[in-house]
Image (spheres, rainbow, N blue to C red):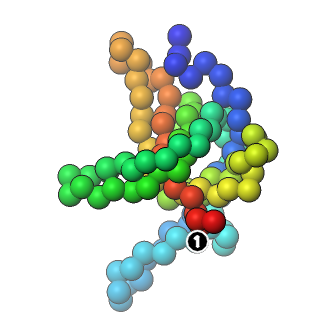
Amino acid sequence: MSLLSSEPHSVNVISPSRTRSLTTNVGTLNYVVPPATQIAVKCMLQMRGGNRVVNADGAAYPIDAVLYTTDLRVNVDDLILPVTPSQLAAFRFIVTSVMFKYKTNGEFDHVEIALSREAKV
């Protein structure tokens, strides 16, 4: 039985379009102009604080929420717009890390996604 047996919440996920300047090699993410895409994802969303160390250099990113889902379409830098629960609808989050979780027999179980608020209030 999956650890994530129900996905009671819903979010909209906006995947940005990515461009890179040929002269400066600086990348830009655009969440508005196509080909940015939006999908609906069923999930379980929890508000929690802390930091997540994501590389060998010790870079730490602040975590404001965690999203659990069985949907594999969510990626780093996606914009998360909660739909339900309605109390979280005022928040906007950026995906800082995506971690695939497996059962003890090696079978895929769910995805754990660390989120940071887009803007601190």
Drawn side of residue 97 relative to residue 36, left or right: left
Give the left or right position of residue 75, taking residue 52 as reference. right
**Quarter of the view holding residue 68:** top right
Which residue lies most toward the left here? 56
**In which quadrant of the rendered image does the C terminus lie?**
bottom right
51 vs 23: above or below: above
Q: x%, y% of residue 85?
A: 75, 40
Q: Residue 3: x percent and y percent?
A: 52, 19
Q: Amino acid at mark 1?
A: Asn
Q: Residues within 10 Å of mark 1 (few under 14, many from 20)?
A: some
Q: Nearer the viewer, residue 18 or 103?
A: 103
Image: 82 above or below 10: below
Q: Of all residues shown, which one is farthest toward the right?
A: 86
Q: Residue furthest bottom?
A: 23
Describe residue 105's horizontal placement relative to residue 55 as left or right: right
Q: Position of residue 39 (x, y in %)?
A: 68, 48
Helix, strand or loop at disc 1? strand
Q: In percent of the image, x 53 and y 16: which residue is there?
A: 2
Can you give x and y, in whole percent of width and height, for residue 45 in the image? 62, 38
The quadrant where residue 91 appears: bottom right
Is residue 108 something one can see in this rendering?
yes
68 is higher (above) or lower (below) than 4: below
What residue is pinned by disc 1? 30
Query: Which residue is located at x 42 percent, y 34 percent?
Result: 100
